[in-house]
Image: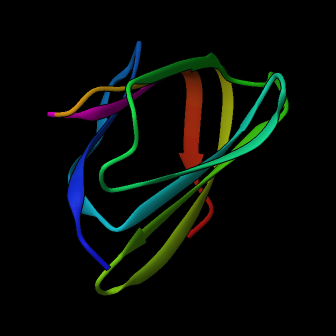
Amino acid sequence: MKAFKLQIVTPEGLFYDGECTQVSVKSTEGGVAILAGHIPYVTTLAKDGWCKVHTEGGKRTAYCSGGMLAVTQELTRIVASSFKWED
């Protein structure tokens, strides 16, 4: 799979800044998966959400609450009210 740039930020700071092959989140409308080349897109994140980041090295899962996901050609960014890796 082709990789793309992902940033995950919260009021506490930067949680992730690097390449991934897929990111999935729970939005207020349901589950959303983003792959490289996705069209520009913005959605709000669920208050009881989750986030899964897939990289060449594997997958990491996190609790992710509130905020938004924004996709542009250059960058996919998650701005969350709270974020905590499960591992």
Residue at image x 22%, y 55%?
Answer: 4
Q: Is residue 86 left or right of residue 7?
A: right
Viewer-closest of 65 and 76: 76
Residue at image x 28%, y 26%?
Answer: 72
Q: Quadrant of the N terminus?
A: bottom left
Residue at image x 47%, y 23%?
Answer: 41
Relative to 25, residue 72 above or below: above
Q: Is residue 49 left or right of residue 57?
A: right
Q: Which residues lie in the magenta part?
A: 74-79
Q: Is residue 75 left or right of residue 86?
A: left
Q: Quadrant of the C terminus?
A: bottom right
Residue extending farthest bottom: 57
Residue at image x 59%, y 25%?
Answer: 82
Relative to 83, residue 45 above or below: above
Viewer-closest of 57 and 73: 73
Magenta region's main secondary structure?
A: strand
Relative to 23, residue 79 above or below: above
Image quadrant in which you'd find residue 2 = bottom left
Whether residue 68 is visible: no
Whether residue 15 is visible: yes
Q: Position of residue 6 (x, y in %)?
A: 28, 45
Q: Position of residue 78 (x, y in %)?
A: 44, 29
Magenta stretch contains residue 32: no
Viewer-closest of 13 and 75: 75
Image quadrant in which you'd find residue 17 = top left
Image quadrant in which you'd find residue 15 = top left
